[in-house]
């Protein structure tokens, strides 16, 4: 048997995406690279506008029509960049599944939920209507939707946010994909439901041996859910490490800023949380060098003008995952 680590299920190399704007073409992704094997879990984290969701859309072949993409996305030996839409359609929903950020907009309001879950089963597995309906019920029961049989005929607006999210998970898992992408899967859910949904995703990934790409801005969520984390900023990866390693020590100023800004238990009443000065720049305003340089206290002119090369640093936590940082002036915290 071929070793899954030497032959990753998903190999992303120098992925670049440009989008048209009123000011010209803007680089939205700038050289994203990573591997993912079956059973591995990877988290993408960063502020809104850093490129996390765009990376997911690029993997799924769902970029805006005018977007330009280059680099390589190799999934189970097949190159996806430049693949025809019809061939891509055979992968989406069958071997690649995605849980979208907002289920109310992702689900079709005109069809009962069982028909939406049954659609990929009929399309990719040639199931008859009744067989697909029975499978839809089985999937809803697997994701622990309360009174699943009674809710087969329900429409999305008749379900709560947590229930709609479970329907989305059922759709994504209908054909037992090898790769699952979850883009902010707990947005707008209360804390109790968040915990249930995340526990469910973790259980299903473990049972089915899928590869998982989890996108979030929540550091606490990443600590509990994934084995490896990539911190994104300005359409590029600024730091990546095993999850335990990243929580033990951070090297990039942006990563340190994210960790410093998170709420912590034990702070006295009235304590102000730290913030990262400034905001994520417009895509057309990104500097030639480090995208974070305009918000970094330690930046010098070379940071803004010179292309950054990733460096490997000595890990504090023993792991097979190297700790890499894209900052020439990095320091540990």
Image (cartoon, rainbow, N blue to C red):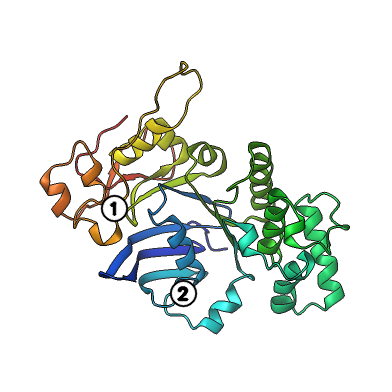
Q: Residues within 10 Å of mark 1 (few under 14, many from 20)?
A: some
- Identify the residue at image location x=79%, y=77%: 127
Horizontal side, residue 78 vs residue 125: left or right: left
Front: mark 2 or 1: 1
Q: Residues within 10 Å of mark 2 (few under 14, many from 20)?
A: many
Q: Is residue 221 above or below residue 82?
A: above
- Element marked by disc 2: loop
Quarter holding residue 132: bottom right
Horizontal side, residue 323 vs residue 267: left or right: left
- Element marked by disc 1: loop
Q: Is residue 100 in view from this perspective?
A: yes
Residue nearest the viewer, comparing 162 with 178: 162
Picture coordinates of residue 148, whole percent (x, y): 84, 55
Q: Is residue 153 above or below residue 251?
A: below
**Residue underneath mark 1:** 281
Q: Residue furthest top?
A: 268
Q: CA distance from mark 2 to mark 1?
A: 30 Å
**Residue underneath mark 2:** 80
């Amino acid at each position: 048997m071929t070793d899954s680590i030497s032959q990753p299920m998903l190999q992303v190399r120098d992925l670049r995406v440009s989008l048209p704007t009123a000011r010209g073409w803007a680089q939205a992704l700038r050289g994203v690279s990573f591997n993912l094997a079956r059973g591995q879990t990877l988290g993408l984290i960063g502020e809104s506008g850093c490129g996390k969701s765009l990376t997911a859309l690029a993997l799924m072949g769902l970029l805006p029509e005018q977007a330009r993409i280059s680099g390589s996305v190799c999934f189970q030996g097949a190159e996806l960049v430049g693949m025809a839409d019809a061939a891509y359609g055979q992968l989406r929903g069958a071997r690649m599944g995605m849980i979208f950020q907002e289920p109310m907009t992702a689900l079709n309001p005109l069809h009962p939920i069982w028909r939406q879950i049954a659609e990929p089963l009929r399309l990719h597995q040639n199931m008859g209507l009744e067989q697909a309906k029975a499978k839809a019920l089985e999937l809803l029961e697997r994701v622990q939707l309360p009174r699943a049989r009674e809710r087969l005929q329900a429409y999305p607006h008749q379900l709560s946010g947590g229930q709609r999210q479970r329907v989305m998970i059922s759709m994504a898992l209908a054909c037992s994909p090898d790769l699952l992408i979850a883009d902010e899967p707990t947005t707008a859910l209360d804390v109790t439901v968040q915990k249930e949904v995340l526990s469910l995703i973790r259980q299903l990934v473990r049972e089915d041996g899928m590869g998982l790409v989890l996108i979030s801005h929540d550091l606490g969520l990443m600590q509990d859910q994934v084995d490896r984390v990539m911190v994104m900023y300005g359409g590029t990866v600024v730091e990546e490490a095993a999850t335990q390693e990243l929580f033990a020590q951070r090297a990039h100023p942006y990563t340190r800023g994210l960790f410093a800004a998170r709420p912590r238990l034990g702070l006295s009443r009235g304590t102000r949380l730290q913030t990262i000065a400034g905001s994520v720049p417009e895509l057309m305003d990104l500097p030639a060098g480090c995208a974070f340089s305009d918000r970094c206290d330690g930046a010098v002119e070379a940071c803004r003008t010179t292309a950054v090369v990733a460096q490997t640093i000595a890990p504090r936590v023993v792991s097979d995952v190297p700790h890499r940082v894209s900052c020439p002036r990095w320091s540990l915290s």
